[in-house]
Image (cartoon, rainbow, N blue to C red):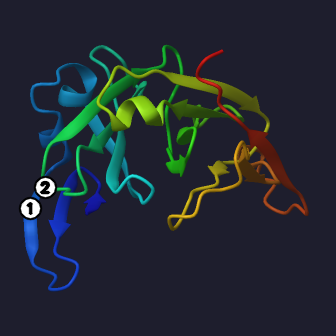
Amino acid sequence: LQMVNEGLQVFDKLTGTSLLGPVAISSIWNGFGGACQNGGSGDPVVIYDQLADRWIISQFAVPSGASVPQDECIAVSQTGDATGAWYRYGFHLTGNFLDYPKLGVWPDGYYVPTSSGDTVIQKQDCIADRKAMLAGKPATEQCVVIDGVNFLNNADIDGRNLPPGGAPNIMMAAGGTQLKKIFDSDRIYYWKVHMDWRT
């Protein structure tokens, strides 16, 4: 499964034959309504959740009347077949600019760090309820805002081996401050992130 700008296509891994597409990413959101159906604007990300044999896609969207992306659209394939049906979710963050989203798989959630905008030195890390989304149930997303750092990247699981029980997701940012034109730094910042959906 590959996404570029506003399009997606599914290929057979062995032969390279196209199994679906190219089609607009918005086709996944037909009938969903809102910004995800009508205002999908790009910065697409696709990852494979190897623990659940599912495909995860995301892109930001601009709600009607807004000038910047404030919605994050995430879809989870209902099976391991990317040409099949999807569970679809739209998360709205009032007042926040969702730019340069990344996407990572961790047992306690789908991690989506983003930039709050091009004029502030502020990033945010949002975690979507992976367990609920894999079952197609209503899901929420929790976010934390971090000031004064460069782009955030969360750890992502590759393979089927789980991290130790309760291990936090590691989120990192390089030093320096892009907007202040400080590009050289000998620092790497990191945070230990854990999501407890019960409390």
Q: Pinpoint residue 101: horizontal percent, then vertical percent.
A: 49, 44
Determine the residue positioned at 72% across, 42% down. 166
Residue reaching furthest front?
165
Real-space CA distance between mark 2 and mark 1, rounded to the nearest whole angstrom: 6 Å
53 or 99: nearer the viewer: 53
Inspect the image, locate mark 2, and give the three-letter code of the amino acid beneath it: Thr
Residue reaching furthest bottom?
15
Q: Do the residues under discs 2 and 1 have CB atoms within 8 angstroms?
A: yes
> Up-down: is 198 above or below 74?
above
Q: Pinpoint residue 160: horizontal percent, then vertical percent.
A: 50, 64
Q: Quadrant of residue 188?
A: bottom right
Crowding near the residue tagged with mark 2, few <14, some 14–19, many ≥20 C-alpha atoms within 10 Å: some
Q: Quadrant of residue 82?
A: bottom left
Left-right relation of 112 to 139: right
Crowding near the residue tagged with mark 1, few <14, some 14–19, many ≥20 C-alpha atoms within 10 Å: some
Q: Name the quadrant of the N terminus.
A: bottom left
Inspect the image, locate mark 1, and give the three-letter code of the amino acid beneath it: Leu
Instruction: Find numbered disc 1 in the image and state the secondary structure of the residue it sits on.
Output: strand
Q: Provide the residue designation for mark 1.
A: 20
Q: Pinpoint residue 150: horizontal percent, then vertical percent.
A: 72, 47
> Up-down: is 16 above or below 118?
below
Q: How many marks?
A: 2
Determine the residue positioned at 66% across, 48% down. 151
142 or 146: nearer the viewer: 142
Q: Pinpoint residue 107: horizontal percent, then vertical percent.
A: 56, 45
Q: Earlier in the sequence, mark 2 or mark 1?
A: 1
Q: Which mark is residue 83?
A: 2
Q: Quadrant of residue 146?
A: top right
Instruction: Find numbered disc 2 in the image and state the secondary structure of the residue it sits on.
Output: loop
Q: Name the quadrant of the C terminus.
A: top right
Left-right relation of 44 to 187: left
